[in-house]
Image (cartoon, rainbow, N blue to C red):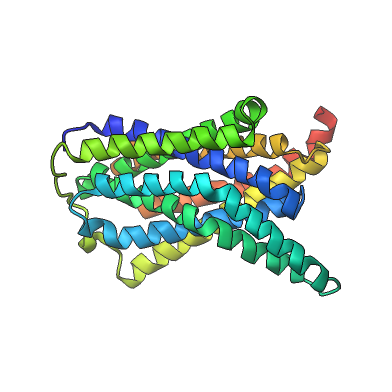
Amino acid sequence: MSKTPLALLILFFFSGACSLVYQVVWVRMLMPVFGVSTFAVSIVLAAFMAGLALGSYWCGRVADRRGNGLRLYALLELGIGVFALIFPFLLAGLDEVYTALYGSLQGIDGAFVLVRLVLAFALLLVPTTLMGATLPTLSKAVAHRLERVGGDMGRLYAANTLGAATGCAVAAFFALEYLGVSGTTYAAAAGNLLIALVAYRWSRGGQQEQTGVGRDAVPTTLEGRLVLGGFALSGFVALGYEVLWTRLLAMLLQSATAQTLSTILVAFLLGLAGGAALGARLIDRWRTPLAAFGAVELLIGLCGLSSIAAFGSIPYIV
C-alpha cells in the first residue's frame, strides 16, 4: 500500500469527528420528540452502540474477503454522508409516527419506553452500522502482522476516539451555535464525502498488501469465546458508568442541557483515547495480554468504587 499508516490514522481521526458531530446533532434533533433528559440521551446512545457493534461484527466477517479495504471504506463513508443528508426527512416521518401513537398508548405502563427505543433504533441503526463497519475495514489496511496487531489496532482506535472527542466538542460548543443544526449537518456530511473521495483515490494507487491477520486469528476456542464475552461485559460496564456518571453530574450540577451532557461525553472519550494510545504502546510488549486485561479491569472497578466518594464531594467544591 502506497500511503503511510499515519495518513490513515489522520483520515480515521476525521471520520470519528464526523460521527460524533452526528451524535450530538441527532440528540439535539430528537430532544423535541423524546424530551430533554438523560433517559432520552441513553436511548440514543444505546441505539448508537448497537449499530456500531452490528457494523463491526458484520464487516469483521467480510473485510478479509475484499481485495481492497480502502475502497470498501470509501463506500461506507459515502453512505454515512448521504444518510446524514436525508436524516431530517426521516425524522419528520418518525415524529408523525410518535405523535400518532402518543394518544393510544396513554396509561400503558412501559409503552412509551418501548416505542422510543424501537423508533430510535429504526432511525439510527443504518448510519451507525456503517460507522461501526469502518474500524474492521481500516484495520485491514493498518494491521499487517499478527505480532503487532494490538499496537496497530490501539493506535487506530485512539485516533478515531480522539477525533470523536474533538467532533463532540466542536459540535456542542461552536458549530451548533454558529452554523445551526442544518449547517453543522452539512459540514459533517461534506467531511464524510471528502474522506470517501480521499480513500477512494488512495485505493486506486495500488492493491493493498495482504495482512497476516486473517481468519486463523479469530478466537474459535472456548478460551477465545470467554475472552470475547469478558470484553462484551467490559463494554457493558463502561457504558453503564457513562450513563450513571452523566446522570449524577447532571443532578449535582443542576443542569441537564445538551452542552452539559456533551462536556461529560468529551471527557469520557478523551479518557478512552488516552487509554487506547497508552495501551497501543505497551500491549505488544506484554507476554500475557490477558493478565494485563484483567489488571486493567481491576483498576476500572477500583476507580468506579472511588467515584462514589468523588461525587459526594462535588457539592462542596461547586
Quadrant position of residue 317: top right
Total labels: the figure holds 0
Whether residue 221 is visible here, answered yes or no, is yes
Residue 236 in the image: state x and y as whole percent: 56, 58
Whether residue 159 is visible here, answered yes or no, is no
23 with respect to 318 (left or right) = left
Q: Is 86 in front, or is 196?
A: 86
Q: Is 30 in front, or is 57?
A: 30
**Which residue is located at x 64 percent, y 50 percent?**
241
251 with respect to 243 (left or right) = right
Quadrant of the image containing the C terminus: top right
Residue 171 in the image: state x and y as whole percent: 59, 32
160 with respect to 181 (left or right) = left
145 with respect to 9 (left or right) = left
Q: Is 278 in front, or is 115?
A: 115
**Which residue is located at x 51 percent, y 59 percent?**
125
Quadrant position of residue 214: bottom left
Residue 111 in the image: state x and y as whole percent: 75, 71
Q: Is 234 in front, or is 99?
A: 99
Residue 131 in the image: state x and y as whole percent: 44, 49
**Which residue is located at x 76 percent, y 45 percent?**
248
**Which residue is located at x 55 percent, y 42 percent?**
22
Quadrant of the image containing the N terminus: top left
